[in-house]
């Protein structure tokens, strides 16, 4: 890319009407709401796409997007927020370790499969934390046959999650014995990366899935579903539709976790709240 083109693109502006076309498209396809205050953010993020595609204006980009399904993959990377952490919102993992699992092993046989779904898993910290919590529980109790379905709309995130490679910093707050038990240190001192051990990675099954889809191609008898810190990007109507479809994928008595700043208040759903952000299917 020459300097002249870079200059042209950095001067490109997104008009209000172009912004509305894009935001309408994004909300329709991914549920993510984009009010006008997000125009500058969208403009700056999409300039990267204009540069990469060597396009000279947003008008041409919009035409390109509507004609090329493959561009959706890049668009979602630019518009989604992927923030996540190991042991994020730890009370959910404490609930699994101290309440859910003791109850589970007292009722279920060792052959039964414990099915968990991390439905907006981002780069994988949520499913891997869940696996670590179950493994730790198993050390003090008995083996559990478990599998964690892990999905996200973003190909980039699913690829990262599948690899399970993180900066050492991502696990800096974990106790040393957990670091040793569940992570491998990169031999390359310069990268300072860690990788989730294969035994843990093999417990997670990664798939691309859009929560806006009419139906979800996953089993219908999950014991636990995580839907954390994604509903917040959707409008109320979409939130209710998504949660309704997720609850349909839970066993009776199954657990749904939502994020700390999300709420299901006022929704007509067959669930009861057992703790803030923790719900049980009736
Ligand atoms: C902020 S992260 C939350 C990650 C994790 N659940 C947590 O709480 O740490 C939100 C994730 O939702 C995903 N996402 C956004 N819209 C989605 C959709 N329509 N379907 C599935 N995933 C979506 C994004 O790609 C992003 O990885």
Image: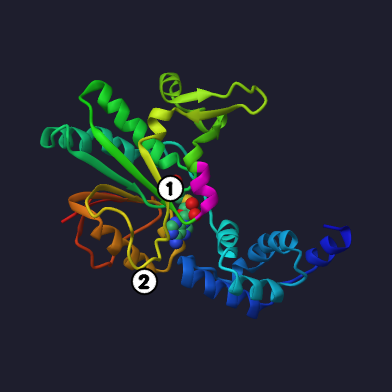
Residue 81 as seen in the image, left or right of residue 247: right
Residue assigned mark 1: 121
The foreground one among 98 and 110 is 110
Scheme of colours in the image? rainbow
Q: For residue 147: magenta?
A: no
What residue span does the magenta drawing correspond to?
A: 154-160
Task: Evaluate whether residue 122 shows in this view.
Answer: yes
Which residue is pictured at 23% across the width and 31% down the height? 144
Q: Is mark 1 within 8 Å of ligand 1?
A: yes
Residues at marks 2 and 1 touching, judged by CB atoms closer than 8 Å:
no
Is 162 situated above or below 80? above
Which is the main secondary structure of the residues drawn in magenta? helix
What secondary structure is marked by label 1?
loop
Which residue is pictured at 36% across the width and 31% down the height? 132
What secondary structure is marked by label 2?
helix
Task: Evaluate whether residue 83 shows in this view.
Answer: no
Location of residue 182 (image quadrant) = top left
């Amino acid at each position: 890319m020459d300097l002249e083109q870079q200059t042209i693109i950095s001067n490109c502006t997104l008009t209000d009407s172009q912004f509305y076309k894009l935001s309408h498209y994004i909300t329709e396809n991914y549920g993510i709401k984009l009010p006008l205050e997000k125009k500058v953010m969208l403009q700056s993020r999409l300039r990267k796409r204009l540069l990469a595609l060597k396009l000279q204006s947003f008008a041409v980009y919009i035409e390109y997007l509507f004609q090329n399904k493959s561009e959706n993959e890049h668009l979602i990377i630019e518009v989604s927020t992927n923030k996540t952490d190991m042991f994020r919102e730890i009370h959910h993992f404490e609930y699994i370790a101290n309440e859910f699992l003791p109850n589970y092993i007292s009722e279920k046989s060792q052959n039964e499969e414990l099915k968990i779904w991390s439905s907006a898993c981002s780069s994988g910290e949520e499913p891997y934390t869940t696996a670590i919590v179950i493994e730790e529980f198993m050390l003090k109790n008995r083996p559990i046959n478990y599998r964690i379905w892990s999905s996200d709309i973003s190909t980039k995130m699913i690829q990262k999650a599948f690899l399970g490679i993180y900066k050492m910093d991502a696990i800096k707050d974990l106790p040393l014995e957990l670091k040793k038990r569940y992570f491998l240190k990169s031999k390359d001192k310069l990268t300072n990366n860690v990788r989730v051990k294969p035994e843990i990675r093999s417990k997670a099954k990664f798939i691309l899935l859009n929560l806006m889809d009419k139906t979800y191609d996953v089993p219908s008898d999950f014991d636990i579903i995580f839907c954390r810190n994604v509903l917040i990007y959707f409008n109320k109507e979409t939130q209710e539709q998504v949660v309704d479809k997720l609850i349909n994928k839970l066993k009776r008595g199954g657990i749904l976790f939502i994020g700390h700043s999300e709420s299901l208040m006022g929704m007509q759903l067959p669930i009861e709240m057992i703790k803030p952000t923790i719900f049980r299917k009736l």
